[in-house]
Amino acid sequence: MNAVRNYQKELDKILDEMAKKGSAVETDAPTLFLHSCCAPCSSYVLEYLRRYFRIAVFYFNPNITEDVEYRKRVAEQKRLIAAYNEKLTDAVDTDTGNDAGGQRACAETAYQIKVVEGDYEPARFFEIAKGLESCPEGGERCFACYELRLRETAKRAKAGQYDYFTTTLSISPLKNAAKLNEIGEALAQEYGVAWLPSDFKKKNGYKRSIELSKEYDLYRQDYCGCVYSQAERDRRKKLDT
């Protein structure tokens, strides 16, 4: 039987090696194209990884069925990134040893975050969901959705010549981290961009995301966004009443 992989330890090892090498200026830091499912899930991941990478957040979620819901979530994502960047700039401005370019905040390296909004194409999600409509949440339909979003992320990462790509999805206790990493590693081989292993719920990552959501007053949705998860949520609510 294969041993269960600890993706957090694998990530720790990569980050430890990067820390040993150091980074004198912002342009020396490796680049990360980070798929984000939503602002709350990205909150901890960005806080954690921006010390090591120059990050571009890729908001690509065609699984979100309703246009109004999509617009609300993408606006929250952009608001959070703006707040993070403003906080960093304010910290740098008060540190006379650094300029306002966002290279360093106080004694800790942290980098400005970019955001890239992908096309909102729910038809692409419904195409990959054909025949899987009745699958339970967390099953094959979700795995196909993972692949859809990660493939577009890998494709864009290659086009932008990023050093790594990964996703915030593994922070959720409801998402299958092993499957996400399996898909990511396969796409890394296909597109020639390194996959950053992760299980962001570890090290109290999920707990920290809840704390940050409260701190920044983020909208926390109670379903993934697709019509199927919405229906399952509604069924659960009826059972609870």
Image (tube, rainbow, N blue to C red):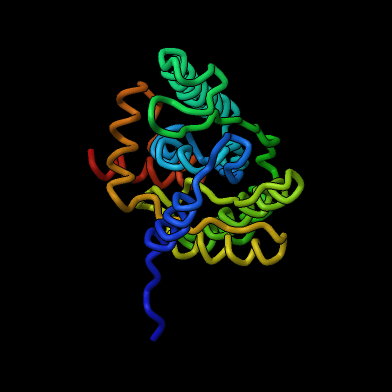
**Residue 59 showing in the rendered view:** no
Q: Position of residue 173 (x, y in %)?
A: 34, 52
Q: In screen coordinates, is 130 left or right of 206?
A: right
Q: Position of residue 38 (x, y in %)?
A: 48, 36
- Please say if 14 is above or below 219: below
State the residue in front, 6 or 1.
6
- Please say if 199 is above or below 112: below
Residue that appears at 62% across and 61% down: 131
Q: Position of residue 117 (x, y in %)?
A: 65, 32
State the residue in front, 69 or 166.
166
Question: Hey, which quadrant is residue 198 in on the image?
Answer: bottom left
Q: In screen coordinates, is 119 left or right of 133?
A: right
Which residue is farthest left?
A: 241
Q: Position of residue 240 (x, y in %)?
A: 23, 42
State the residue in front, 236 or 197.
197
**Residue 150 showing in the rendered view:** yes
Residue that appears at 27% across and 45% down: 239
Question: Hey, which quadrant is residue 123 in on the image?
Answer: top right
Which residue is farthest bottom?
A: 1
Which residue is farthest right?
A: 159
State the quadrant of the N terminus.
bottom left
State the residue in front, 171 or 12.
12
Tell how many labels. 0
Residue that appears at 49% across and 18% down: 89
Residue that appears at 30% across and 38% down: 208
- Please say if 216 is above or below 156: above
State the quadrant of the C terminus.
top left
